[in-house]
Amino acid sequence: MKNLFFGASKNILLILYLLFLAFPLLWVLSLSFKSSMEIYSGIPNLIPLAPTTQNYYSVFFDQNILKSMSNSFIVGIISSIGVVLISIPASYSLVRYKTYLNKGILGWILVSQIFPVILIMVPLYMILRNLGLTDSLYGLSIVYIVWTLPFVLWMMQGYVKAIPIELEEAALIDGASRRQVIFKVIMPLLLPGIAASALFAFITAWNEFFFALVLMKSQDLITLPVDLARFTGMEGQARTGPLAAASIIATIPSLIIFSIIQKWFTSGLVSGAVKE
Amino acid sequence: MKSKKIFCFVKRLLIFLLSVFAYGCAENERGDKIVFVSLAWQEQSLATHKSIVAEWNELHADKPVEYVQSNWNSIHDYLITSFETGDVPDVFHYESSIIVDFALRGNLANMDTLLSDEFKRDIHESAWKSVKSADGSISGAPFLLESMVVIYNQNHFRERGIVPPTFEEPWDWNKLREIAKALTIDSNKDGWPERYGASIGLRSSANILLNLGIGYGSDFFENKNNERGVVIDSVDIQYLNMIKEIIFEDKSISPTSVTQSGPGTIPSFINGKNSMLIGIGTWARQQLVENAPQELEWGVLVPIKEKNQNQAANSQTLSIPAKSKNKKDAAKFIEFFLSKENMAKLAKSDWMSPTRISLLQSDQFQTPQYGWAICTYIVDKLIVGKWLTLPGYAEWKSRVANPLFQEYFSNRMSSKEFKLRMEEESKYVFSRYKR
């Protein structure tokens, strides 16, 4: 009886906590289906009194959010792939090939995260402009790759460290070449880490605002976060309904990707954190 | 077999990447255009902006305008980095109180020689004052004037037998206080009224308090030895304490509203929880027209007169960066964009007063409907606030004034401490902008 009581209380608490966490999203979802008049009425009802899809229509057809979504998607995909391609060999080398420079390199990577974005913005812009990479999705993707790489590298290191070196040694003794060891032994074991890193890079690029604001000048090349900001006005005003609709649409891709590989993502963050 | 598959996958990946990269690069061409960064954000205003640009593009195919929609919250960062890198738009939309800093840093072209005499003659003097520097150079073309009004619920006024003030007999603060008390309903006397007489959005309090203070005789700034600085005198304290008393002693201003922004106070006005919106921008009328139920009748009050009815002029502007390569064409576009007909459309869609004298005198801006006549009346009362052309004002407002006003209005400091901190912290911020 006592166990049943504790079990039920635990579940109720968990459900309440879940509702607490999900409430902002539910509220935004509710706002997205409310008319402007209902939002301004100040009546805090979760279920819209007269649901309307007008906000979604406005977002898709007046604001053409699909364009900025596709830009964000392209940038997100390029940066995820770029980050993964660079971080796999880099993290493997840092973990497996011990040199005196390793600690210094890792420290330097961390130091690069200290600088605030605003500090590097102008020099970065100059460099990219000289390379013809401002106002280009390609240029923005490169920035995101560089910006995300240090964290991903540290994350991937955890995965590589977690793979026992004995596995590689056994494969080498069995006559496998270094390439075979990497592709047939290490890579399959690294897949969760790769997925987590790719997801992290994608979400970072998907949500990033400031680089996109400054580097992308053309209307056709803006990314989703910059587009979302356009629903806000002066003195704290906003087109609340369309903003809520756009936010819901913006959340969907990361929500889908995250729900698919969340297990790998969380294990990626903690792996290597504990010494066995 | 497996490594062959991996190789194939990598090959496909590279082809995909290259094609996407090519897409990214192909888009990187802007051509010989006038780039116009606009801050229009409301549906009606956006449509007006875009239609005027489309009209220009039809008439000037050789020099088209590329319309870039930015937003009020990030335009400052966008412009700062643009000025520093030299990759500037040709025309940008902002407000007079901020562009003065840009002009002082040499980021803006002097538009005095770029704009025609006809245009300059037709712009109201109060608008020019907000963008002209001491040497007469013009940092932007003012096109919309922002002013503050008191919006009231006509149904509540009728219910209490209150007659709104007239141009000839405006209310002073005492009268407004008395009316706010009369409109407040606390039927069970528990100290938490069901309806407040008024609300005042003080989340970004500096703007509203400085503006309303002018009419009260409180100016917060003084000139000493040709240097402007913050000096809090007894009138300033008296003015702030009066508002505090209405909130905490009379309990006729909603205390919740004090923590909200101006727009945040509109829903409670719409659902009848308060009867007046004090110090709200004229743009709020649009929210009421679009979102208030038909049975809610509202109006705009004649501005309060204590010492005078003056307010600080703050205009929305179109400026040309000094590094723009299309200055002359940009100025031509600005004049087209702000022609009499277009400016009328812009003012109507943003619910602000136009700056052209010929428009202000026209029937469409003299009509009592939606309070247009009162908004136009205020234009003549606009003066240059002592702070408006002060370098560092934008930083002072956000770093010093807003937080200190908020602390003072939440009763967390005495007037003595407020005076001391406001003067000292302001001195520190402004000293960094001295040349």
Image (tube, coloured by chain):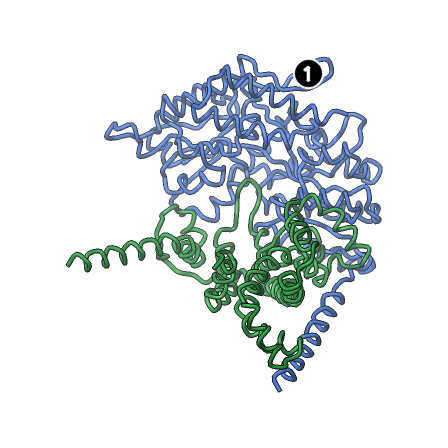
Q: Identify by letter the chain in blue.
A: B
Q: Name the residue at the left extreme.
A: A1
Q: Residue, x 31% and y 57% (percent of image)? A: A15
B286 relative to B389 in the view: left or right: left
> Alpha-carbon neighbours of circle 1 within 10 Å: few (<14), some, or many (≥20)?
few
B220 relative to B432 in the view: left or right: left
Q: Residue, x 51% and y 17% (percent of image)? A: B417
* Corner quadrant of residue A136: bottom right
Q: Name the residue at the bottom extreme.
A: B1
Apparent colour of chain A: green
Q: Residue, x 68% and y 16% (percent of image)? A: B223
Expressed as whole percent of the image width and height from the top left, the position of residue B3 reads 64, 82
A237 relative to B113 in the view: left or right: left
Q: Nearer the viewer, residue B119 or B20?
A: B20
Say what secondary structure mark 1 lies in.
Answer: strand
Q: Which residue is mark 1?
A: B223
Expressed as whole percent of the image width and height from the top left, the position of residue B8 reads 66, 82
- Chain letter of disc 1? B
B122 relative to A24 in the view: left or right: right
Q: Where does the N terminus of chain B fall, quadrant-wise?
A: bottom right
